[in-house]
Image (cartoon, grey):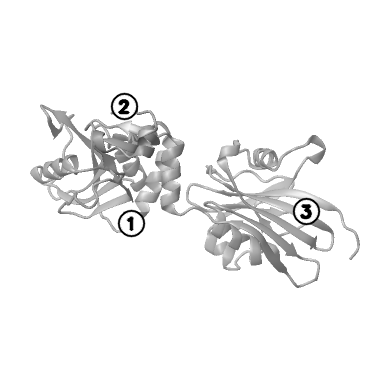
Amino acid sequence: MEKLPFKISVLVFVRNADGKFLLIRRAKEPNKDCWSPIGGKLEMADGESPFECAIRETREEIGLELEASDLHLFSMTSERGYEGSAHWLMFLFECKKRLEKLPPDICEGGFAFFDYSEIRGGKIKIPETDKKLLWDVREKFCDGGIAVLRADCSRAGELSWTFEQTIKPMNDNEKILKIFRDTGALMEGHFILRSGLHSGHFFQCARVCEHMDRVSELVAMLAKKLAGVECDTVLAPAMGGLVLGQEVARQLGKRFIFAEKQDGNLVLRRNFKIGDGEKILIVEDVITRGGRVQECIDIVKANGGKPAAVAVLVDRSEGKAKFEVPCVSLLEFSFPTYAPDAVPAELASIPACHPGS
């Protein structure tokens, strides 16, 4: 095979708020007249990194400003002898930030949004390597993990590839726990709880609520589990359920109200009303015994409404919290606790602290 130039580029998979993909119809080679994700070659003379290139190309081509945290690198793909003109090393990125509107055409081509079914169903012309390989890789790794590929495009009409290395994406539970750890909600050490018991873990859900982007991620996962639940309104108990309840309501497109303490009991205030037969989804951050959720159920029934379901971020009840309606939790976990005179030696060797409420 003759010697060919080696080029390094990025592709950025961008979607709009409806989940449709932004593609550009290439006006120049390679891939002329084909629809593909935006991207371009690295400015290697400037020492540009793949992330810097993806950020620059996205800004220049569609006017979307990104930071490195807005991108997930899901593949590094080497293409040998692409179209007989060059060897390519491509860095493939999933863009987490959504594009609000269709950008104007540029000299490299014109833009359009497409459903995933249109792209994979053969309704538009896309490059053969994209059709046979890259979109499949994106589907498997866009939410986490990474695939390193070697594709041989040197024989006309034939494409072969090898996965040189893959890091599997995290499952939902692993993603959730990572968010809790990253935000400081889930701490590990030696803690003296309000009960006086000792534990190697402490969970403070309010720390997640400092980061609305992470709250949105968690609620999006919770909303998937609520797909079969019909409701008119979301009700949350203050304070813990406020942020989560409001975000659930926003993502479901429902009205939001909350209950708050008065004389030691949860009540509806602020002229909130529940109509006769109105279906209410009750949202809480964490349940241990489920007392606040039960109070909300009682409020709904007392006002003529109909409890539809309970949705919680974390269920720590170990199956003990029971309600008259279905309870959907994003994560179930509990940690062992110890009396002061029964703390294991390994835990006792760590200085104890009071984590606060």
Quadrant housing the N terminus: bottom right
Q: Is residue 75 left or right of residue 230?
A: right
Q: Position of residue 80 (x, y in %)?
A: 79, 61
Question: Which residue is labeled 3 in the image?
Answer: 28
Mark 2: secondary structure: loop
Check whether the beta carbons of the residues at disc 1 and disc 2 lie within 8 A of each other.
no
Q: Position of residue 179 (x, y in %)?
A: 44, 41
Query: Closer to us: mark 3 or mark 1?
Result: 1
Crowding at dot 2, Cα within 10 Å, few <14 / some 14-19 / many 20+, comes out as few
Q: Position of residue 273 (x, y in %)?
A: 16, 38
Q: Is residue 135 visible?
A: yes
Can you say whether 343 is above or below 352 in the image?
below
Question: Which residue is labeled 1 in the image?
Answer: 227
Q: Earlier in the sequence, mark 3 or mark 1?
A: 3
Mark 3: secondary structure: loop
Within the image, what quadrant is residue 226 found in?
bottom left
Disc 2 residue type (three-letter): His
Query: Closer to us: mark 1 or mark 2?
Result: 2
Please tell me which residue lies in front, 5 or 306. Answer: 5
Disc 1 residue type (three-letter): Ala
Please tell me which residue lies in front, 274 or 313. Answer: 313
Q: In the displayed orientation, state which residue is furthest to the bottom.
A: 157
Can you say whether 35 is above or below 312 in the image?
below
Q: In the displayed orientation, state which residue is furthest to the right.
A: 2
Disc 3 residue type (three-letter): Lys
Q: Position of residue 144 (x, y in %)?
A: 53, 51
Query: Closer to us: mark 3 or mark 2?
Result: 2
Crowding at dot 3, Cα within 10 Å, few <14 / some 14-19 / many 20+, comes out as few
Measured Cα–Cα span from mark 1 to mark 2: 39 Å
The residue positioned 13% from the left and 34% from the top of the image is: 267
Question: Which residue is labeled 2 in the image?
Answer: 354
Q: Is residue 32 visible?
A: no
